[in-house]
Image (spheres, helix red, strand yellow):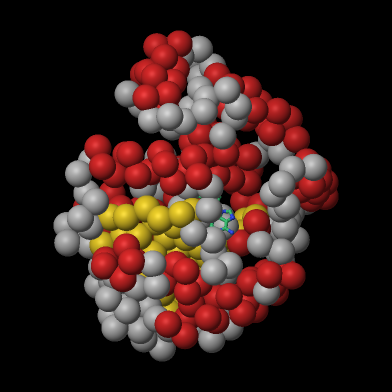
């Protein structure tokens, strides 16, 4: 069932019953909001519950453009995967993938090329559990894997048996770090981490990055983003914004593809829905190529 079938965004008892039953059968806790289901709710997906949506309400009071921001980010992810597939890449390594939601990388990649291989990576246990069950249900585990690893351990990801089984590192790979690096502080040296991944990839590989930002935003949105970051300060996850200049440093060693580092609606737009400008300034994104 998709969100289009709901009578109201916040009144979907039938869907909630089904989602909760599915999660509980899988042994997943439904008593607290879970980040992957909250993200699904931002995107208008159907894999979330009233508890998750109540959390979304709170976030929207702090950052009113959170839903358009999530959607324009997800739309960038789709276009980046489609463009990589159109350029002949058949292998995708999606770090910080989250759980299955609206527009999943493997669905986009397999539609473009049914023999594509995808490895999803996330550090969050619930996202990993949920993804593994969904992939088994879809009977795609011969081509698609979900592993629980941390971006900050590149060799743990690149040398994982499931990664080695599905990805041939002598051929180009599309490495996705979409809406991920704002969880990584400068103390974890993100540019060095990316350089490490690059050193293990074949020429022709691509890197797709997107990041929350506010450096060009009007003051009112700058203040909202600051309050959003502040709200995360009291959690186990810290959030970091980065400027366009900082994004350029993350792409050092990669040849930036057109149109460079831009706000998400400006990266090769193909659908008017990307033109929701309310979150325009709140992200940076780009795709680089290893030459
Ligand atoms: C906002 S979601 C992005 C999902 C998807 N990439 C997208 O853009 O639509 C960010 C994901 O990154 C994961 N994450 C955060 N820190 C991570 C880390 N150090 N290593 C791996 N995953 C991480 C979170 O668990 C979450 O599922």
Q: Going 62% across and 77% down the picture, which residue do you hit?
A: 191
- Percent x, y of residue 93: 39, 64
Q: Is residue 41 above or below residue 269?
A: above
x and y percentages locating residue 207 in the rendered image: 46, 72
Percent across and percent down for residue 85 are 28, 65
**Total number of numbered discs in the rendering:** 0
Q: Is residue 239 in view? A: yes
Residue 94's quadrant in the figure? Answer: bottom left
Q: Determine the image quadrant of residue 5.
A: top left
Tell me which residue sits at (63%, 22%) in the image.
Answer: 54
Q: Locate residue 239 relative to residue 267 in the image: left or right.
A: right
Q: Is residue 2 above or below residue 66?
A: above
Residue in the foreground of this view, choosing between 200 and 287: 200
219 or 47, nearer to the observer: 47
Image quadrant holding the N terminus, namely top left
Quadrant that contains the C terminus: bottom left
The structure residue drawn at horizontal position 40% and vertical position 55%, both measured from the top left corner, is 147
Which residue occupies 24% across, 72% down?
A: 88
Q: Is residue 155 left or right of residue 144?
A: right
Query: Which of the pair 169/255 is nearer the observer?
Result: 169
Q: Is residue 67 left or right of residue 233?
A: left
User: In the figure, 61 relative to 159: above or below?
Assistant: above
Q: Is residue 4 visible?
A: no
Q: Is residue 257 left or right of residue 137?
A: right
Q: Position of residue 265 (x, y in %)?
A: 52, 54
């Amino acid at each position: 069932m998709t969100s289009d079938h709901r009578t109201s965004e916040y009144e979907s008892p039938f869907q909630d019953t089904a989602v909760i039953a599915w999660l509980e059968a899988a042994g997943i806790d439904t008593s607290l909001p879970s980040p992957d289901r909250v993200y699904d709710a931002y995107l208008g997906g159907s894999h979330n519950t009233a508890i998750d949506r109540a959390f979304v309400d709170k976030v929207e009071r702090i950052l009113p453009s959170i839903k358009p921001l999530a959607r324009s980010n997800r739309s960038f992810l789709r276009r980046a995967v489609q463009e990589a597939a159109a350029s002949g890449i058949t292998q995708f390594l999606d770090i910080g993938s989250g759980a299955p939601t609206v527009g999943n990388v493997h669905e986009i990649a397999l539609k473009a090329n049914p023999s594509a291989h995808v490895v999803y990576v996330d550090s969050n246990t619930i996202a990993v559990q949920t993804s593994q069950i969904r992939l088994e249900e879809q009977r795609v585990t011969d081509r698609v894997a979900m592993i629980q690893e941390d971006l900050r351990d590149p060799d743990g990801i690149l040398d994982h048996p499931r990664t080695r089984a599905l990805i041939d590192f002598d051929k180009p790979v599309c490495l996705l770090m979409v809406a991920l690096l704002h969880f990584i502080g400068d103390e974890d040296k993100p540019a060095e981490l990316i350089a490490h991944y690059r050193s293990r990839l074949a020429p022709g590989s691509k890197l797709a990055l997107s990041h929350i930002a506010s450096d060009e935003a009007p003051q009112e949105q700058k203040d909202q983003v600051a309050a959003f970051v502040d709200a995360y300060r009291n959690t186990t996850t810290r959030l970091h914004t980065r400027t366009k200049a900082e994004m350029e440093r993350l792409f050092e060693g990669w040849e930036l593809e057109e149109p460079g580092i831009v706000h998400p609606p400006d990266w090769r737009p193909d659908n008017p829905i990307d033109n929701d400008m309310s979150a325009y300034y709140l992200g940076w994104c780009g795709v680089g190529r290893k030459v």
